[in-house]
Amino acid sequence: MHYTNMDMTEFEVTGGRLLELLESTASCAQLSELLCIVDKWSQLYDRAEKVDNADGCNKMHVLGQALCVLLYRCPELELSKYDLRAALGACCARIMLSSKPLHEHDIEELQNLVTSLQLEFTTLYTMQESVAEDDSSAGYWSIVNTEDICVRIMAHLGGLLAQRRQDDTSELAALHGLIDIDNNGFCTVRIETVVFLLDALHSLYSLHTLLTRAQFVCLQNAQDLVPVHAHHREASNETFFTHSMTSDCAVGSIAQYAHRFVHLFHSVSQTIYYNYPTYSRQIQLPLSELQRENARSVNLLPLLTELRPDIPVFFEHTGAGCRQAHAQHKWSWILWSHFVLLVDSEMRSYVATDARTLAHYTLKSKS
């Protein structure tokens, strides 16, 4: 991954501010400032960047660890009083894996919680369609406050990173490769574990903000839907197989696999079969179904890449949600789990019930 001077300056400025806050003993950072940095962290630092051989991290991981520690130190979060079960609400039964409050989770319980959030992510969002042209409520809504949950998890992870402690119950976590224990019995979280968790949290937070801040696009006339034909379907079959496998991967899992097996990773098929050994590939819909209004976006997107080959598709492991990647194109698609979004060069995101509506929007906005 090559970075411009501007990118390095941004990294140095942000990193310098985080270092300043970490070294400050006079006062803790304000929560409002930290949340602004979390937002910047989610957009400016690419989770897909390869990890450095020396420390096993990329820039996103380095800044993420500093942010976690600062969030842990922030008294405004009141982490010890945080009720994760209440925050998850009706979703608690399928996500909550431990009866402990969040601030008492050990590293293995924390990783189980994050993994569960990854697996259930798609069930947490509903699409509200527009009932009027200026309906500001249209778009994706989350049934839980994913941003806040991610921030609280980061804060607790920061506490586990900041504290070097002895723990008689840590042998199991050590056997699972999550922590290291020195000769004196002191535990530290392994860098591979931190990278694994931050890949997931960065993905969850980034996709959540893209979805919930997206502008909903609708057509007044169904005849304006971009037409798709048999040759688009036939020409995009291989693209569909790649897209469909990508859509079946849990949010964050491709980035996790790519960093865990950095010297082996070359295809998303490795991720899907690693996590789901008995996986069966999806079959593309017949043309008649693809031509129906509100056909499944994952199935339509490969055909739209034939119609508009100038619009690239980004995935979580190729720059999706990274401002620098999207700035290089007037329009770009994001395929992330089962979600399809359109993003412009200013990182504004757009969603619709029919992906062809988004394709029409790019044509309408050419001027």
Image (tube, helix red, strand yellow):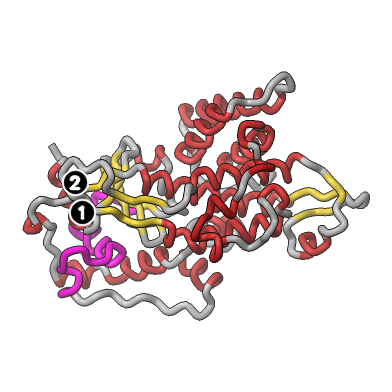
**Where does residue 324 sit, x and y in percent of width and height?**
41, 38
Residue placed under numbered mark 1 in the picture: 308
Identify the residue at horizontal 84%, vertical 46% (top origin).
165
The residue at the point 67 percent across, 46 percent down is 157
**Between 62 and 4, which is closer to the camera in this rendering?**
62
Of discs 2 and 1, which sits in the foreground? Answer: 2
Residue 44 is tagged as none
User: What x and y, as percent, mark residue 333?
Assistant: 31, 51
Picture quadrant where residue 236 is located: bottom left
Q: Are marks 2 and 1 in contact (CB under 8 Å)?
A: yes
Q: Amino acid at mark 1?
A: Arg
Circle on res. 362: 2
Residue 353 vs residue 78: left or right?
A: left
Q: Residue at x 38, y 45 (%)?
A: 210
Label 1 element class? loop
What is the count of numbered marks? Answer: 2
Q: Is residue 334 magenta?
A: no
Q: Earlier in the sequence, mark 2 or mark 1?
A: 1
The image quarter in which residue 175 lies: bottom right
Residue range of the region highlighted in magenta in the rendering: 288-313
**Residue 5 versus residue 339 in the image, above or below:** above
Q: Name above or below for residue 259 compared with residue 274.
A: above
Q: Is residue 319 visible?
A: no
Report x, y in % for residue 92: 55, 60
Give the camera-side residue of 27 and 240. Answer: 27
Which of these two is toward me, 64 or 366? 64
Q: What amino acid type is highlighted by mark number 2?
A: Thr
**Residue 307 in magenta?**
yes
| Residue 39 higher or lower than 351, as above or below | above
Residue 122 image position (x, y, % from top left): 42, 60
Asked whether the viewer can see residue 291, the reply is yes
